[in-house]
Structure formats: C-alpha cells, structure tokens
Image: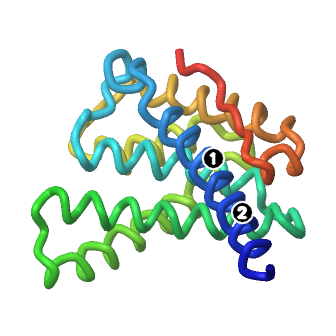
Amino acid sequence: MFQRLFGRERQANRAITEALYAQIVAAARQTVIYSDWNVPDTPLGRFEMLSLHMFLFQHRLRGENGAATEVAQVLIDEFFLDVEHSLRELGISDVGVPKRMKKLAKMFYGRMAAYDDAVERDDRDALAAALARNILPEAAVWPQALLLAAYVADAARHLAAQPAESIASGTVTFPAAG
C-alpha cells in the first residue's frame, strides 16, 4: 500500500518537473531569440538561453517556502542533468564530462549573479551589458542585447505575477519574445 501511495506521489512529482522544464525549454527556444536577436543557434547559444530562462524561473521562486522551494531545487537538478546529457550527445567522453560540467556550472552561477543584480535594480543597460558579455563576448557591438534585456525584464514581471502555488503544481508561463 505504501509503495503504491509513494509511487503515485513520485509519478506526480515527475510529471510536474517534466511539465515545468518543458515550458522553460520552450521559452528558451523561441525562434525570435535566434532569428531576430542574433543569439547564436549553437549548443553554447542554446545553453545561454536555457540558463537565462532557468535564472528567471529561479529568480521567481527565490524566497518562497514549501513546495516552491523543492520545485526550484528539482528544476536546477533537471537542468544540469539535461546539460550533462547534451554534452554526451555532442560526443564528449566520460572523462571530459565532469570537467565541462564544472565549467558550465561555474558559468551558470556567475550569470545568475550578474543577471540578478541587474534585474533587481531594473537596470536594462547593465542587463544588456551582462547579456552581451556572456552571449556574444566576441562582438564589439550587439544592438539586440537591449531587446533581450527588455524581454528579460518583462519576463521577470510576468513571472512575478504568477502564484507560487500554480508554479509548484506544474504551470509556468513566459511572455512571447519580440
């Protein structure tokens, strides 16, 4: 009996995790981001956009209690499992994966800190500069960074309006890019 009850709970939690992660990935893969805003449609460019949307999700749930806190942690775990899986699909060897994961984790948490500061201050210029520095570091000028920064600010407001209970139950929405 306990196994059946806990098994159902585990399946329900897995369904929530998969639904939330799918919604985050869908937001990160919006076509306009790559076609109009010139984010590179490469593994690293997609990592940047998924990291950005994970930041937005984590930013929204920061300070929440209960199920929302658990969901936030589970989604971070899911994100890193997905990144590891992607590295393996790209042909990175078992020996090389931990080294790359360490580097990507450091990149992710560094970006979270930079984006968080700019979003908290509602400083779009600082956010655009952080986005440009991380997404297109080799470009001298990236005018679309301001468009992406405006989207991030809009997404942060959009997510803030969503009840934590709704998110914890598996529903999160992001605004349309562009």
Q: Secondary structure at mark 1?
A: helix
The amino acid type of the residue labelled 2 equals Val
Q: Position of residue 7 (x, y in %)?
A: 69, 71
Residue lying at 47% horizontally and 52% vertically, measured from the top left: 51
For disc 2, the neighbor class at 10 Å (few under 14, some 14 to 19, many from 20) is: many
Q: Position of residue 58 (x, y in %)?
A: 67, 57
From this view, report whether residue 64 is shown above or below residue 131.
below
From this view, report whether residue 170 is shown above or below residue 36.
below
Residue under label 1, please give it: 20
Q: Position of residue 134 (x, y in %)?
A: 37, 50
Task: Report whether 136 appears left or right of 54.
Answer: left
Q: Position of residue 176 (x, y in %)?
A: 59, 20
Q: Nearer the viewer, residue 99 or 87?
A: 87
From this view, report whether residue 70 is shown above or below residue 89.
below
**Badge 2 or badge 1: first in the primary sequence:** 1
Q: Are marks 2 and 1 in contact (CB under 8 Å)?
A: yes
Q: Nearer the viewer, residue 10 or 172?
A: 10
Q: Secondary structure at mark 2?
A: helix
Residue under label 2, please give it: 71
